[in-house]
Amino acid sequence: MDRTRALVVTAVPAERDAVTLATGAPPDAFTLPTGLTLHRGPAWDAVAVGVGPAAAAAGTATVLAVAPGRYDLVVAAGIGGGFAPVADVGDTVVGSALVAADLGAESQDGFVDLAELGFGRTSHRPPDGLAEAVAEAAGAVVGPVLTVATATGTAERAAALAARHPGAAAEAMEGHGVATAAAAHRLAVLEIRTVSNPVGPRDRAAWRIPAALRALTDAFAAVGPAVEKWRQQPHEQHG
């Protein structure tokens, strides 16, 4: 089967629906035997798989196993926190890398990541040029998106993550899990986030979730031609 579409993976249904809204057509909803509901569209399918890297990896792998050969790109998408001054509230971020930021071990000399421990990949990257092309189409910032299992809620942790990952643009909870599943199926991966809040002290009153969801719709409405141009170019399998 020719792979001619992307699988867009979100954490929650509100994010999935924001992505689907960008098509301008009602979703063709299909419930998989596992219970996940896939919104099928002309250029991408969207699915909400749950919060966190484990749910993201399991849900993404499930869809890819049920529909082998259907996809050529897997996109982790949703809202997230932004690392100022790289990305502010209201910005869109396209990941130059999908990084497992808190998966590893603490030591007397500081944090040791998964790769340094010899247990796997800490980071996955999109195909050359794809993140930049998509960011240009969406008017987005390009930078690493950090995947965490515990959302940052203090200035101290935000500073530590920014120091450990120079240029970090955003924080979310699913990207590395999505990327791990995509890599297992030798598929390209990308991450698109719209910023609802700054990474730092937890202040729910400052969150701008509805605006970030609208920005997510706008981003997906804009990026189709850039993805299609990438699709027309010869590229190697990933993994």
Image (spheres, rainbow, N blue to C red):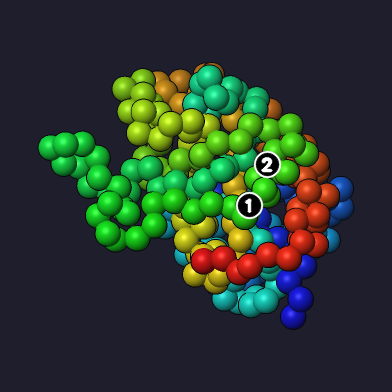
Q: Which mark is residue 200?
A: none
For residue 3, which quarter of the picture?
bottom right
Position of the N terminus by quadrant: bottom right
Task: Evaluate whether residue 50 shows in this view.
Answer: no
Q: Is residue 151 above or below residue 5?
A: above
**Where does residue 119 sit, x and y in percent of width and height?**
29, 61
The three-letter amino acid code for the residue at tag 2 is Glu
- Crowd tier of the residue under label 1, counting other residues whose Cα lies within 10 Å: few below 14, some 14–19, many 20 or above: few
Residue depicted at 43% across the width and 31% down the height: 166
The three-letter amino acid code for the residue at tag 1 is Asp
- At mark 2, the secondary structure is helix
Q: Which residue is mark 2?
A: 132
Answer with left or right where residue 95 lies relative to residue 218. Answer: left
Q: Is residue 92 above or below residue 123?
A: above
**Where does residue 121 sit, x and y in percent of width and height?**
39, 57
Residue depicted at 12% across the width and 37% down the height: 108
Residue that extends furthest to the right in the rendered view of this protein: 25
Answer with left or right where residue 58 lies relative to residue 231. Answer: left
Q: Is residue 31 above or below residue 205?
A: below
- At mark 1, the secondary structure is loop
Q: How far apart, in angstroms, are the residues tagged by discs 1 and 2?
A: 8 Å
Residue depicted at 78% across the width and 39% down the height: 137
**Where does residue 139 sit, x and y in percent of width and height?**
74, 32
Q: Is residue 137 above or below residue 69?
A: above
Q: Which residue is mark 1?
A: 128
For residue 87, which quarter of the picture?
top right
Q: How many marks?
A: 2
